[in-house]
Image (cartoon, grey):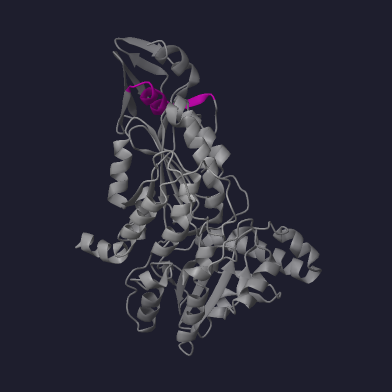
Amino acid sequence: MTGRMTMIRNPMIPTLLLTTIVAGGTALHVTAATNTAANAAASAAVAAIGKPAPEFTLTSPQGKAHALGKERQGQKATVVMFVATQCPVSNAYNERMAQLVKDYAGKKVRFLGINSNKQESIEEVAKHAKDNQLPFPVLIDVGNVVADTYNARVTPQVYLIDERGVLRYMGRIDDSQNTAEIKKQDLREALDALLAGRAVPTAETRAFGCSIKRMEKESGS
Amino acid sequence: MAVVHRLSRRRAAYPTALVLTLAAGAALGPAAPMRAADTPPESAPAPASEPSTVDLQPIDDKSLKTEIARRSGKIVLVSLWSRSCPPCIEAYPHLVEMARKYQPQGLEVLSINVIDDERTRRDWSVPFVRKQNPPFPTFFEEAEDDEAFIRALDAKWYGGLPAEFLFGRRGYRVLSMTENVDVKKLEGIIVQHLEGRVESKTDPSMLELRAFVERNGGSVTWNPSTQTVGVMLGPQRYRLKVGSTNVQAGRDGVALDRPPTVEDGRVMVPRSFLDSTLQTS
């Protein structure tokens, strides 16, 4: 399974996201900028288990705006997945994420991808989603504002939101990048519990992944 | 039981394979330049001119603590990497270089391979390490649960790579560099710890007391209820209080230019106190 992972040795540093947006046309520029401001305003809220999942509006590479509140409507669960194009760990999950969407089709579960990596361009995100036939929109988180709000640190990292908009699970998809070694399907267990009206067995997990590459800020490391 | 579980999880085929690989490839050339990460390093043919420094030991959250404790008195860098982490692979040769440079001054590096499965380790990671010929041991994370290992390193860390953790001379963690890992910056911080002169992030005229004292063979005790620090350095005894410029030095009193402060749980004192009072003791 891991054999098909590709390594990117020299991640081509793509044109800065912002540059791309500016060059990409006024409409997209305005939308993205507005979204960033709105999301920054919403980011007073912080993601926490048992609390309402912070609202966000992000745009797909095609320029379509997706608001969490709207996406959730009529759904029993919403899964927000922070992903990357260049992270081999995230890429090892492409098929698994697609399978999840398939397996939960018809069960009122909405899947959304978010790319917050500053070095992955809009074009790259679009191409990656197409090449890997990802059956969910991958939204662009300019300035990693939503990643900050959700305290998403790695890819892949997922968040499960219930029908009332409350965050019920955050963490890994499962416990091993290598499908042969999986012992715990954390996301599926949480989803199944949620859909069955049971308590989510483990609300928070962690796993190795790729750090989300954020915009430079005052950071104490 | 835990042990049985672990054995069944990863060990089945893998140690034998590793041992074989090791034996077959005892040949370590000098550190070779890095190759494109998607081409596996060619298996090293070769004259076994020097003994292998490549240790291939499993490590879990418990044995990690033991490994750090064993290196008491040294500054220990725990460096995590994976084939799945391009920036880690890119940084690796620099870490090797840094380790060579600072080992004589008391730096120890524990290199820990994570994520990679048995086959990747055997076919790629082990040959990679062999090529790089590091002067430090390499471990393979084999905790029963990765999460336990992640939390053992830093409870606030989410497992993102690259990740570098620095431990002080008594085994306490002094730095987690888990985002925007910058080897140059890391080197600068390591040098500060090796020299016992760790600057405040906000005010370079303030230095960390403990790093200096332990660098010079002494020890410190902290009393949180009184906010006082006791220093034992050779025959000398000092008592400092956060927020107060009065220092008790044996039976005498010494005045500080500025009161000690606490930064990230560490007591910082004016540089002049280390340079004059403690240095001459």
Residue A127 image point, x, y percent? 67, 73
Question: Does any portion of residue A59 appear in the rendered image?
Answer: no
Q: Residue at x 33, y 71 (%)?
A: A183
Magenta stretch in the rendered image? B205-218
Q: Residue at x 55, y 46 (%)?
A: B91
A119 relative to B14 in the view: left or right: right
Of the pair A39 and A134, the residue shown nearer to us: A134
Residue A169 image point, x, y percent? 41, 69
Residue A114 image point, x, y percent? 58, 69
Does the magenta-highlighted stretch encompass residue B212?
yes
Q: Residue at x 37, y 23 (%)?
A: B213
Residue A156 image point, x, y percent? 50, 66
Quadrant of residue B67 in the image? top left
Q: Is residue B77 above or below residue B248?
A: below
Residue sitting farthest toward the left: B1
Q: Residue at x 28, y 48 (%)?
A: B63
Of the pair B268 and B79, the residue shown nearer to us: B79
Quadrant of residue B7 in the image? bottom left
Question: Does any portion of residue B206 appear in the rendered image?
Answer: yes
